[in-house]
Image: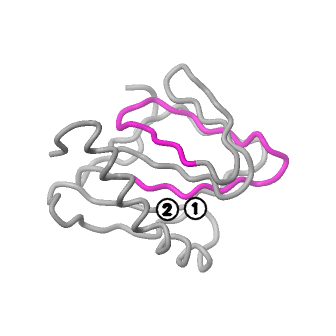
Amino acid sequence: MIASDKDGRRRIAAYAAVTFMIGQTMMSQSAGSETLLRTDLRGIKSHELLVWTNDIPVGSTTDLHHHAGHEVVYVLNGEVKIRVGDRGKIYRKGTLILVPAGATMKVSNVSTKPAKTLVYMLTKKGADLTIKGGK
C-alpha cells in the first residue's frame, strides 16, 4: 500500500522517469493506441505499472470515465483538453499531467492535427483500468 498521496506521487514520477526512455524506444515501433509495457513493481507486490500510447483523432472526445490507478499523461503531439473533475485545461506537446486514482476525467483533442499521449499508470493488480462514468 502506498504510504501517502505525496509518497505515491513521488513513486509515480520516479517510475515514469525511469520508464520514459523505454516508452520512447518502444513507441517508434507502435502504431495506434496500444500497451507498451505492463510490469510488476519491485517492492510493491500488490501493484503494477502500465505504459501505453493513445492516438486521439482531431475533434474527438472520450466518454466521462475514471481509472483505478494514479495516471501520468505526457502529451507527445497536438493539444488536448483534459477535464479532471469540474476543471478542464488545455495541454500542449511536452506537458506532463498527474491524474489521481479515481478522478473523473474526459479527454478531447482540441488541435487541428491528431494528438498522441504517453500514459503511465500505477494500479493494483487485477483492477479494472478504465471505468465508464464518474466515481
Tell me which numbered mark, 1 or 2, is placed earlier along the sequence.
1
Q: Give the Cα separation between the discs numbered 1 and 2.
A: 7 Å
**Amino acid under label 2?**
Trp
Say if the magenta span includes residue 114. Answer: yes
**Amino acid under label 1?**
Ser
Task: Indicate the quadrant containing the C terminus: top left, top right, bottom left or bottom right.
Answer: top left
Q: Secondary structure at mark 2?
A: strand
Question: Magenta segment range?
Answer: 96-121
Left/right placement of residue 94 relative to residue 10 reads right
In x, y percent, where is residue 11?
A: 30, 52
Label 1 close to label 2 by CB (< 8 Å): yes
Residue bearing mark 1: 33
Which sits in the foreground, 134 or 99?
99
Prevailing secondary structure class for the magenta stretch in the rendered image = strand
Q: Residue lying farthest right? A: 112
Q: Secondary structure at mark 1?
A: loop
Q: Nearer the viewer, mark 1 or mark 2?
A: 2
In x, y percent, where is residue 29?
A: 60, 80
